[in-house]
Amino acid sequence: DAGVIQSPRHEVTEMGQEVTLRCKPISGHNSLFWYRQTMMRGLELLIYFNNNVPIDDSGMPEDRFSAKMPNASFSTLKIQPSEPRDSAVYFCASTKGLTQETQYFGPGTRLLVL
Amino acid sequence: GDSVTQMEGPVTLSEEAFLTINCTYTATGYPSLFWYVQYPGEGLQLLLKATKADDKGSNKGFEATYRKETTSFHLEKGSVQVSDSAVYFCALREGNKLVFGAGTILRVKS
């Protein structure tokens, strides 16, 4: 079975540009999580969805960040405008239900904002 | 909120050495505890978990025991291999979310 799929795997952009990261969760999973990983701050939860509805976005750093889940098989994380401090690895993870404890992570998108 | 503290790395060991990576947690209740592993260039994978006090999680030769009295969940392996080189994350479940430690880099030399 396919795992969590993220695209692109690498993104290099210039400050001020819009960046869109994409995630396809595992089929049948109805909870999806976006994380950011940096050396300074470690792994941070940005937002999570259950049944396509955002449940907790308290980790989203600021208004420049937005996330959507238009259907059960697709989610996006958008940064507009991007800044150098947004450079990080962004992971998507999915799980079945909110009480399911095993989250399955995608390979991540490595973002570099110049 | 709840938090997880891991020993700082990197931890560098020779092949077949004994491994311990310390993890302690702060939580209001008795959360489920996890170890995740991240191999270079990949996402995190669940390594093992324990859901209540005195439970022992184990997988691939790794073990960790949920110690309520010391609020700890230390990861151990009797004999590490070069292929175990990775970043190890201790985590707890707070509500519907996972709270991760900072991660510990393990390097195993042949």
Image (cartoon, coloured by chain):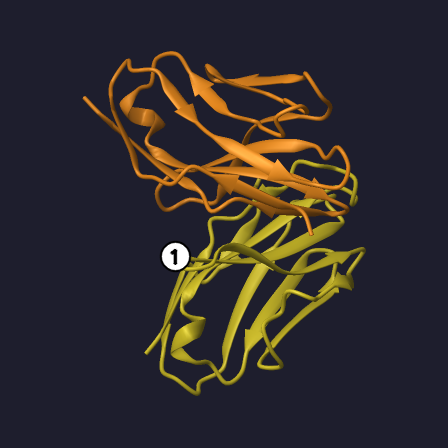
Residue occupying the point 30% across, 19% down: B81
Which is nearer the eye, B61 or A76?
Answer: B61
Q: Residue furthest bottom?
A: A16
Label the yellow chain with its letter: A
Q: Colour of chain B?
A: orange
Q: Residue at x 53, y 67 (%)?
A: A21
Residue A36, percent across and down? 51, 59
Chain ID of residue with mark 1: A
| Mark 1, other Cα within 10 Å: few <14 / some 14–19 / many ≥20 | few
Judge whether A21 appears above or below B31 on screen.
below
The image quadrant of residue A51 is bottom right
Name the residue beneath numbered marker 1: A39
Residue furthest out toward the front: B69
Residue B33 visible, this angle: yes
Q: Where residue B17 appears, x then y in whole percent?
A: 29, 15
Front residue of A111 and B14: B14
Q: Looking at the picture, does residue A14 appear above or below residue B53?
A: below
Q: Is residue A1 in view?
A: no
Write the residue at 61% across / 26% down: B70
Furthest residue in direction left, as rendered: B110
Q: Position of residue B12 (x, y in %)?
A: 26, 30
Q: Secondary structure at mark 1?
A: loop
Question: Which picture quadrant has residue A13?
Answer: bottom left
Kind of residue indicated by mark 1: Met
Residue B19 image offset from top left, x and y in percent:
37, 20
Left or right: B11 with respect to A69? left
The foreground one among A58 and B71 is B71
Quarter holding residue A35 = bottom right
Residue B17 placement, left or right of B61:
left
Q: Quadrant of the C terminus of chain B?
A: top left
